Image (cartoon, grey):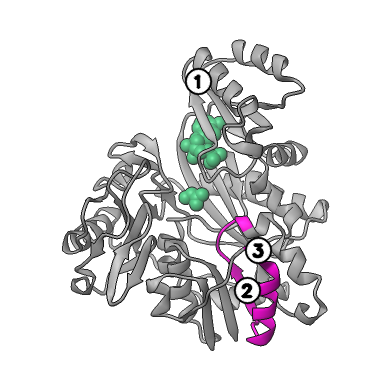
Amino acid sequence: MNILLLGSGGREHAFAWKIKQSKHCSKLFIAPGNPGTASLGENILLNLNDFNATADFCKSNHIHILVVGPEDPLVKGIYDFLKSDVALKDLIIVGPSAEAAQLEGSKAYAKAFMQRHGIPTAAYKEFTKENFEEGRNYIQNHSLPIVLKADGLAAGKGVVIATSHEEALKTFEEMILDAKFGEASSRVVIEQFLKGIELSVFALTDGKDFVLLPEAKDYKRIGEGDQGLNTGGMGAVSPVPFAQGAFMQKVVDKVVKPTIDGLAAEMLVYKGFVFFGLINVDGEPFVIEYNCRMGDPETEVVMPRLSSDIVDLFVAMDNHTLSNQQLVFDERSAATVVTVSGGYPEDFEKGKVISGLDAVFSPETIVFQAGVRQIDNQLVTNGGRVLAVTSLGSTITNAVTSSVNAISQISYEKKYFRTDIGYEFK
Ligand code: AMP
Ligand code: GLY
């Protein structure tokens, strides 16, 4: 089968690495990809949001499966666009319709969906310019801290946890009146703060049945001990030690099943990954967010722990046989440590020469590339998150140690990474 994968980050390098191992994979194309994916398939120049060009590419290259890495094309309707083309009617698209992608594209849509289906989530209210004054009153009477969320996509930056009413009011004004996140913050969800440990759970669904992939926990803050600014993700571990037994049963019964049943009941077309951003509050799972795609850097620990052929799963998703699939996981622990550019998530420089990648050749360690570009024969940094270094080990501690050791072999100017990924589980 010919497979086209959209995206260019560490997540896509991990997907490409996994897809390439499938017995079904004949040709793999990645658009636009990065130097890491170029070693696994053919990188092609394609604008992710140019659906016409994607359709043409799929036709002329006889693509059987399209895997959409990031959320943007999904929320903008790539599924619906391609499916409306009769010449692409047999194309397997891993990713939901635009309507179903609203679970990620609109926080208010997701909250209302959860309410309709009795799925545990923080209490909330939504506000726009129209009920702005009501919003101010709501904030003034709300317990602290207060969580404010821009409704639309804001590249992971649209959530503010305010610790005072003044900060919450200021943020609320900035979001709605000053359009801090553009159109995305013209509607704001204000919700109760939940205290607990977060985890990410992933399902692959055809809109009716589902399989669960290995769960993971990501580390979003820039600093050790979860201090400082939020980033796209500084590392991840899998498995999550508390995600088992009674707790995981609750995740399935109270969150995953009601979500998939809700999609079916509302006739939402969803064939793809559902990412449940959860928080464990005293043994009870609550949904913090849905994403309509896999996580980054979670994919970089999930793919190495998935022993089953991923293309088998995509085919089963398409022909509604997911319930026959018995997934096999690698029982070892996986840890990803992300190296970033100095200064990230604030201003940083690009174009720093990366060396030492060849020195990392332990069979337990894989270096996934994220913000990397090749100029002539050199790899240079090209983003905030540069490399996602994943290792497998008998324990989370061993896996993290292997990744940290591998990173010490790699150099580029102002390299920064966290050494404490997985710290709660050591
Ligand atoms: P989101 O973009 O919805 O995933 O939110 C970003 C981050 O903000 C989450 O990963 C949580 O760490 C935090 N967060 C969001 N909502 C809440 C909440 N209701 N209570 C506590 N923390 C939250
Ligand atoms: N790691 C969180 C995300 O991909 O949104």
State yes or no: residue 310 in magenta. Answer: no
Please name the amino acid that badge 2 sits on: Leu
Residue at (76, 53) in percent of width and height: 99
Q: Which residues are magenta?
A: 49-72
Q: Is residue 184 above or below residue 132?
A: below
Residue 222 in sight here: yes
The residue under the point 61% across, 34% down is 150
Count of all numbered marks drawn on residues in the image: 3
The image shows residue 217 at horizontal and vertical percentages of 43, 49
Q: State the separation of the CA atoms marked 3 and 2.
A: 9 Å
* Neighbours of disc 3 within 10 Å: few (<14), some (14-19), many (20+): many
> Does the CB distance between marks 3 and 2 fall below 8 Å?
yes
Query: Label 2: which residue?
Result: 66
Which quarter of the image is occupied by the N terminus? bottom right
Q: Amino acid at mark 1?
A: Pro
Query: Is residue 321 visible in the rendered structure shown here?
Result: no
**Residue at the disc numbered 1:** 145
Q: Quadrant of residue 77?
A: bottom right
Q: Earlier in the sequence, mark 2 or mark 1?
A: 2
Q: Secondary structure at mark 2?
A: strand
